Structure formats: C-alpha cells, structure tokens
Image (cartoon, coloured by chain):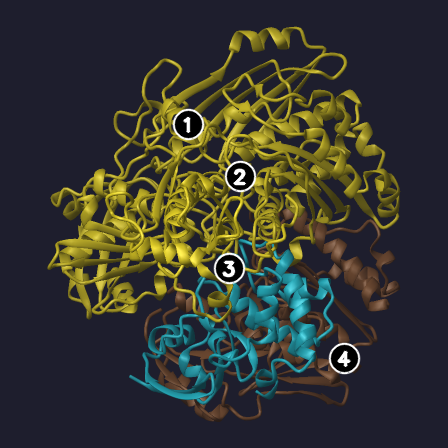
Amino acid sequence: MSVTENATGIGAAVRRKEDFRFITGNGQYTDDVVRPGETRAVFLRSPHAHAKIKNIDAAAAKKMPGVVAVLTGADLATDKIGNLICGWMIHSKDGSPMKMSAHPALANGKVNCVGDAVAVVIAETLAQGRDAAEKIKVDYDVLEAVVDPAKAQSPGTPQIHPDIANNTIYQWHLGDAKATAAAFAAAAHVTKLDIVNNRLVPNAIEPRAALAEYDVGNDSLTLWNTSQNPHVARLVIAAFVGMAPEHKLRVIAPDVGGGFGSKIFIYPEEVVCLWASRKVQRPVKWTADRSESFLTDCHGRDHVTHAELALDANGKILGLRAKTIANLGAYMSTFSSSVPTYLYGTLLSGQYDIPSIYCEVDAVYTNTAPVDAYRGAGRPEAAFVVERLVEVAARQMDVDPAELRRRNFIKSFPHQTPVIMNYDAGDYDASLKKALELADVKGFGKRKREAARHGKLRGLGYSAYIEACGIAPSQAVGSLGAGVGLWESAEVRVNPTGSVEVLTGCHAHGQGHETTFAQLVSERLGIPFENVSIVHGDTDKVQFGMGTYGSRSGAVGMSAIVKALDKVEAKAKKVAAYVLEAAEGDIEFKDGKFTVAGTDKSAAWGDVALNAYIAHKFAGADLEPGLKETSFYDPTNFTFPAGCHICEVEVDIDTGKTEIVNWTAIDDFGTVINPMIVEGQVHGGIAQGVGQALLEGAVYNKEGQLVTGSMMDYTMPRAHDLPSFHVGLTTTKSPSNPLGIKGCGEAGAIAAPAAVINAITDAIGSEDLAMPATANAVWSALQRANKQNSPRAAAY
Amino acid sequence: MSNFTFHRPTTVRQAAGLLARNPEAKLLAGGHSLIPVMKQRLASPSAVVDLSLVEGMVGVEQKGRSVVIGAMTRHADVATSPVLQQVLPGLAAVPGSIGDPQVRNRGTIGGSVANNDPNADYPAACLGLGATIITNKRRIAADDFFTGMFSTALEDGEIITKISFPIAKKAAYEKFKHPASGFALVGVFVSKRGADIRVAVTGAGSNGVFRVKSFEEALKKRFAAKSLDGMSIPATGMNSDIHASPEYRAHLVAVLARRALAKANA
Amino acid sequence: MPAVSMTVNGKAVTGDVEARTLLVQFLREQLRLTGTHVGCDTSQCGACVVHVDGIAAKSCTLLALQCEGAKVTTIEGLAEPGGALHPMQEAFRENHGLQCGYCTPGMIMAAIDIVRRRGNDLDEHTIREQLDGNICRCTGYHNIVKAIAAGAKNMAKGGGARQAAE
C-alpha cells in the first residue's frame, strides 16, 4: 500500500511508541517487578537424562539460612496440582489418539531429561536459595538414555513413559499414498534427499521468569510472567492444572524480551511459583539463568526426514513424498503435536503445482528437552524439504534453478493443494523476477570467477518459500485437532475527550503493536496517533485473547480491531445524528469529522465522543450512552505469505568458513501497515534462519547431556556473522481479512535455511552437507567431494 | 556463587601475605575467567584477593631489547599500546583478538597467562616469542611455564607481576575463532628473532599450548609460508569437540601458520 | 556485610553487600536501576553493559566491591531526566535499532564505547566487529548497525557531552 496522506496512518514508517521506555531503561520486564515480601524460587534440576528418583533428602537444605520452604513432586501430588498438557490432538493413521505422558511440574519418582525440576527451594534471597539447593541430596537410579530420535522406536530401546510403546507418540500421515506412488512410477527423474533439520534453542535474550503472588483476603492469585499469550496461560493453569478458578487467577505479561515461540507454552516453573506462593503466603519469583533456558525452554525443529521429488522429462513436478521422524523430547509441550503435522505436512506443496503429495510423520519421545514451536514452527522444516528438493532436482537435471521453479509455480488462485491448504492469493513469478534483478543474478558468473582468483568458492542459493499464517479459522483448526479457537478479540474504548484505548488479545514482545495498531486507529478515526494507546498483556484488563505467534497479530488481531472500529463508527454516527439534528442515514464520517450530507453542518470527533458520554442530546431508551465496542474476529482462511530469497556466499577453500556476501529478500506480505517494522521483522527472521543454517545446533551426547548448554558452545548469530540485507516487497492482498494483511514475522526464518544451504552446496559442488554448515562441516564436505572426485568438485 | 571474603591489597607483599594466610584464596585480576567459573560454582574460593590496587603492575614499557608488560595491564591497553605498535605489533594483535571489546576492557595479561586456558590467546604469544614470566619469586621461561591445560609452573603464593617479551624482528598471530565463545579454535603465533624461530599453537592441542618443532625446523631455511608447503601435523593429540574434529584442527594449524608467516613478512 | 560506595549516574551511593554481589545485582536490586539487564551467565550477551569510569564493562562479570570508588553510568544516566536523549539513544529509535528492547540498554552503552575507541566515523565492518560482545535475537543487527553509524556521527555534532566529560 502506498504511503497515505496521513503521516501516521497505514503504510507510514512511523517511529515506534514503545521505544522511549526501552532506550531509557524504563522497560518493565517480569524480573523488574518487585512485590513486597518477595521470595525467590531456586529449582534443583536433574543432572541425569533418565533416572528413577529413589530418595530426596531435603533436611539439611531446610536448615540453611533464609530458607522458607523446600518442596518436591510428592508435595505437588499431595496438593493435587495437575499435569501440564498438550492442547492439540493428533490421531495416528490407524485412528488412535496420540499418546500423551504425564507431565508433573516437579518430577515425581522419575526424571526424563537433564534439567527436569526435582525440587524447589523458596528462600529470602537468590543466593540463599542456591546455597540451600546445593544441600539437597537426591539418590538417583540412572537409566539408559534415549537420545537419537531415529533410534527411539527401535526394539530394545528403553521405554521412557509407562504404557507408551516404542516411545511413539503418533504415526500420522497426510495426502494420497497411492496417487503419489503412481506419480513416482511414471517419473522421468526422481530426486532423493536425506535431511536432518537441526534442533535449535530459541534463546530470547530475556530469560523466562515468573512472579506469583497470593492474595489471602480474596483467595486469588496473580502471575507476572514472560508469556506470549497470558489468557491461554490462565486457561490452561486454571482448567487443566487446577491451580485456581479462572476468575481467581490474573496473568500479567508485562514487557517481554523476545519470544520466538518459546514463551507461548505453559511451563512447570510458573505453575510451581503459583503453588508455592499460596503455600508460603508470600510472593515467589523465579528468573531463569541462561543455563536453565538452554535446558528447559522448549527447543525447536529436530526432524529426520527422507524426501523424494518426482519430475517428468520437462522438469514438471509430478509428486512429492516425505517420511519424517519428529523428536518431541521428554514431554509433550503445549502445542508440540501440531508443529510436525498440520504446520508442516500442509506446506509441502510449496509455491508449486504438485498433483500428488504424501507425507508420513512419526513423533517420538526422547530424553531431551521438550520440542515445540520456534519461529516458523513446521513451516521452516517444510520449506527446507521443498526448496532443497527443487534446487537439487534442477542441478541434477541441468536446468536453471530459477527456471525449474518458474515452470512449476502455481499461477492461478484460489489453488487447492493436495495437502489441505487452499492458497487464496499470490504472485510467485513477480517475487522471483524482482529478486533475480535485485540480486544481480546476471552478474553472478563474473563475481564467481573473481572470487576464485582469491581462493574463494562463490555460490548462489534460492528459496521460494511459502507459509500459512494468520492462524486461523477456529472451525478449521478445530477439525484438525486444536483444543482452542484461534480467533482474536479487540475492544475499542473511546474516552469522553476523544482519545482511544484499544485492548487487544495479542501480545507484543518486540513486534511493535503499540505503534502499528495505533496507526490503524489513527487512520480510521482521523485522530492523532498520540491520542491512541494500546493495552495488552493483562487478563484483568483485556476481555480475552489468543496471543501472538504464527505471524497472526496483523491478520487476525488487527482485523478484530477493524471490526470493533466498524461498530464504534456506527454508534458514533447515531450520536452524531442527535448532535447535528439530522437523520442517521445522512451522517458521513471522514478524516475525524462527522458531516450531514449535502449541508455544511459538521461535528468534530471529540464533540461526538463527549456527547456519547454526557448523553444530554438523546434518551437512554433510544441509544445507550458511551462509546466502547468489542469484537471477536474469526478469519475465513489462513493467509499465505510467500516470497523469494537469494543468498550469495563465499567459502574459504582453506578453512571451509562461509561468508554471506549478499542477501536479497522479496516478500509478499499483503498490506503493510508500517514498512519500517516489517523490514525489521524480515531482518530478524533471516538472522535466525541463517543461524540455523550456519551456526546453531543443540547437541546432546549419548548420555543425554546437553553439550551446547551455554552461549560458550551454542553459537548465537552475532553482528559479524551477518551482512546487511536487501529487502523488498511485492504485493497481492489477502482476500481473507478486511485489511488484506498476510503476516511477516516468520518469513525470514522460513526462507533462509534453504537459501543458505543451496548457496553453499552450489559453491562447493556437493549436496552432502548438513546444518549447521560450520566451517568444519563445509571443509569436511569439500574433502569428501575431492575424494569422490566428482566432476563438479573437480571443476574448482 | 558461594560467598567469600574480599581483599584489596596495595602491594605485592600484602597480596602474597593474604595468599599465605588463606590457602583457599584466589587472585582476582580482570576477573573475566574467575568470576564466570565462580558463578557456575566450579570454583568456590574462601577468599578473593583483588590485585587492582596493587601498585606497579600496569603498563607497557620497552626495556632494552624486550617489552615488559605489567601483569594487571588490560587487553585493550596492550592492544593499543603505542610502544608495541612500534616495536612488536605482532604481539599487540593477540590481546586485540581476545573475547570481545568489553572483555578486553577488563581482562588482563597476567590473569590470562596464569589461567592457561587451553584455548586462550596469550599462551601462544608467550611461547611463540619465548617470553619470560616474572613473579614475586622468580623468572620463568615460557617454555617451562605452561605445563598442561589450566596448569602452570606457578607455585602456591606465587604472583605474576610482569611478563617480558623479547622484541622479535618478525612476529604475527593468526587465529580461527571459536564461533560461539570467541576463544581460539586454533591460534598460531610465529616469530623470528635471529636464529630463534618459533611456531606456537593454542586451542588445538589436548594438552594446551605447544610448539611445532617440525615447522620451526623447516622455517630455518627460509622464514616464509612457502617453506611449509606440503607440511602438516598429525591429528593425534588434537582436541576434539562439536566445533572441530582433530583432523580439522591439525589442518587449521598448517593453514594458520602459513597465514601468520605471510602476515609476519608483510 | 562489607559496605560499598560509588557514584552512579552522577549520584553518590552506598550499600551493604555480600562480597559475592555482582555489580549488576547491586544496580538492579539495591539501586532499583532495572534498565541494565542480565541475558546470560557466561559473559557473552552484553545485555548488562554499563560504563565503569567511562569504559564499557559487563556488569555481570564484576563484583560490586571491585567498583568501590568508581564512577558508574547506566542506561538511566544517559539522558537528563526530562531532557534530551543521548544521540545514540535517539539513533536507535530513529533507525528502528530495537524490537523487544531487552538487549538495547547494553547495545547502546556498548555503542557509545565503540565511539570512544574508534571515533565518530564508523564503517559497517568496524561496527559489526566491535559488536562482538553484544547479542540481539530480534533485529538481525541490520538496523543496530545503521543506528550506531548514525548515532556516532551525531555525537560528533556536540551531543553526548555528558559522556564525553566522564
């Protein structure tokens, strides 16, 4: 959308409202909140991946200075605190429901991963709590650990949970197996790939935290926590964990320092803090240190996949099939089951017209941290499968990779894929064309020759990704197993002075909602941007909401605001009719002014707002006083952001080190409210995708110890690991919501991994390269390629 | 971290006395190795003796044909020392590559050398230049000082006060950074001072910093990258972890040695 | 408990601390200056960067007692209350150099230190290398790099006088 005349309206790169507090150190994150009489919780965690707890001796710890209480899983069970749950039901191919193990907030009798909480010390100070935790003696009977997801189902492998055979949670499938087999039988060319989608640690820079306070007088609980969806947290903790009735539990997610999915879920620590605060009748605070974050934040990805692509002699794709083992870790986290199924298999058509697709996914338990949604959640895994297959197929068939993509692009909409999704709008040719130009692909040959003169191998990699965002129509997700509806709500409160508060069920943790949502209101009501406040993150203030993830806040959350604004405008017109002494049907509203059609009579926004409240000009029987409207918006479809990223790399032949020398991102996000913020989302997403491709990977050893347990071993992308990015947009509006928004938060993380690996494999002339493509990994791949003396490698 | 008593002596004598009276004490220099391990409770000293107020332990001075650096001189100050830039820029590059700017603003040469982390940079410079480590008790040649990972010839109560580096005609350091920690995955320091040719390697060896005698021999004919053509070192004895295999580390030693030689001759 | 005295953001402060108290704990818990954050426990992330005697340091890797007598500046001390923002703060806002805001105080303090060491005319490569000690998970650094280049230039125009004087 072009920049409007309204400098703070839709399409304007408005500077962010929230920044002043952050750049001056006045943000208010959970750990910054202090309550009178506050105590600190310190968790004693299992050092073993798999063990029976024979005995816990807390006697010495209880005598340590400053200790208020030491609590264990047995106490939790005595108090009948319920288990954590996974809220998305998946059925196996045989129709049986997924196998969900018990997940107590404190281990009771058995630990299933390193970091499992075994006991909690409540102490006056953090240091005293830590001193005391050291004194708890736990007697473990150590069991053999299950670490490798590919072997978790094998006979003879230890069983992690009682009654869950072969550590198998479900065996799910999607698509038409027969039709796909027929497509492969008829193929002129088949490309096969074995892919490991590496396990990632989200590492939001603000560690998770929880502060719980019990109010004796009202028998109610308040929880401040690092949540992307406080209402969902309240619902689960009330209805499933049974901590307190929903109306006696208030959840406040204040400023939250990044989430990337990891703060969607309901975790043991917030449950324990709530429970402990009621037991000791004092506020209880816990803030993770980074070591705890590594061990206990839900990890992302972790798929082992075999994938195949069938093509005819002209490079037309006939079919795709994939078999994936998804590692969900020791317990099923809140939305874990949906990630490798409906957020993955449904995207295997990519941007391509593929007649037949068949996907099988086995989800398994292992003695590792739980795995759940992490930026992109299933869709990066799908995009990686599709975009690696297409790129490798093009190379094997000696077709230009851009041309092969073009031949297979979906060109008319709506388009029904064989895997549920109905793509409603897009123009994949347009984004590819623009990306080819911006990346100067024509000049690549020259740059490659120049690099070779300096001992560098240059490569180019494409990723024409698609994602499904704006999650999503409640009825549709319900039919797929979701335990909740995925609508969003908004309340628009117009004050008597004409200023506006918008209460939204979305939650911002870096996305800038306070700015973009205010831009929408400013444009729609024609009032100054400064006169609009966005309220979110408090279950006592906001009516209800599903929170922020899956790039849904624009498409779903802002749509709810639009609907509420529609109602506000309708009501305001009624008030204006009384103020202007005209028929309601003659009232027009534009640029913050009400006019009577065909006259010069007008009333300002503020006049009408005031009149709505003083209610002197109409009787309550005709029109209710006040100007405040609520909407619950349920979308009609997912949205389908898509685009084309091109990565250009140089690989140092001597060391194997890869440098990204150019990045081009052309994305179609539909309507853009604030291009500055959208670009920022793209940058951050690419950085996480590059991190996955080049740097990051959680590694457990065979005993189930997390080898990459700190930032000393787990490589976080730093400024010098990344280039500046060239980003641009093409636009087809989403027909599925009133603003035409598609969503932008995850695109970079979905597009980037395949672009990087396609570029490096192009550079080194070998497809035998896993993520993360560290210098050592690339050097080893070069050695193997040289040994095999492959003709492509020999060319260098 | 566990609690401790904190001491701030103003002389080396006082510091030594505190160490004598508190056998479990640890010296605190820049604190950028000690405090992190104390936070993880991997070290829980009963007393911490902060050397920051001790006089005469800071500065970079040329003394005859050596450069003498006070043990409490911070990495940032060594890296930007005008004296070093003039007479031994190859050494200045070493602290310039340590950690990150904030770490370099606090970390000290004495702390780094005394800690002898097998992936630290300064041990390569000390061994690669044939430095002398000067303590409150004696002078120790670098060849005798580094005795294995996190292990040195320092005795109880011994405090490094200065380190003396001979001014080599040619010297350079090449480092391949550990992508996460910033330590040396492999670091190679080369120098030539008359007939004394040294190639010292950090990060690679499973027993800490070491010299590559075969490279040194080959370089006696000509101190140039070309002299190492076709040469490599065996992977046995190299560190192995998720970031680098022994073979890769051995390979990097040869690559970085050649690059360091090219830099030293530039 | 030992007492510690220092000057924080121009004000003399004293407090009783355990010897093991880190500077960042003293600032956050005793002085309630919560703009300085903790993002890791291995001195990697840089969310805790403050200036000690005008030089950037990681306050998670310093004991409060090591700062006896020191002049400490935190993010809260950059702009005068109600007054103009420091040019580096302003540059982060103008260039969208932050998203969730958690790494931001450390980033800004580190950025000002880059200017102290490398001057006001900073190229992209220098900024990226000098940001080695600060991790951001949101922005991909693109806009942080832009913000620092712009902030550095604006500091040359007479802004940030209070910092320069320290």
Secondary element under disc 2, as helix, strand or loop, is loop
Residue A564 in view here:
yes
Answer with mark 3 or mark 1, whichever residue precedes in sequence. Answer: 1
Residue under label 4, please give it.
B85
Left or right placement of residue A236 versus residue B187 in this view = left
Q: Amino acid at mark 2?
A: Leu
* Quadrant in which the N terminus of chain A is drawn: top right
Total numbered circles: 4
Q: CA distance from mark 1 to mark 4?
A: 59 Å
Residue under label 1, please give it.
A363
Left or right placement of residue A232 versus residue B30 in this view = left
Q: CA distance from mark 2 to mark 3?
A: 20 Å
Q: Which chain did the image draw in yellow? A: A
Answer with mark 2 or mark 3, whichever residue precedes in sequence. Answer: 3
Secondary element under disc 3, as helix, strand or loop, is loop
* The colour assigned to chain B within the rendered structure: brown
Task: Say which residue appears at 60% left-offset and 57% top-offset.
Answer: A7
Q: CA distance from mark 4 to mark 3?
A: 58 Å
Contact, CB < 8 Å: mark 3 with mark 1? Answer: no
Residues at discs 2 and 1 both on one chain: yes
Residue under label 3, please give it.
A528
Task: Say which residue appears at 79% left-offset and 40% top-offset.
Answer: A437
Residue under label 2, please give it.
A739
Q: Is residue A519 above or below residue B193?
A: above
For residue A152, the mark is none
Residues at discs 3 and 1 both on one chain: yes
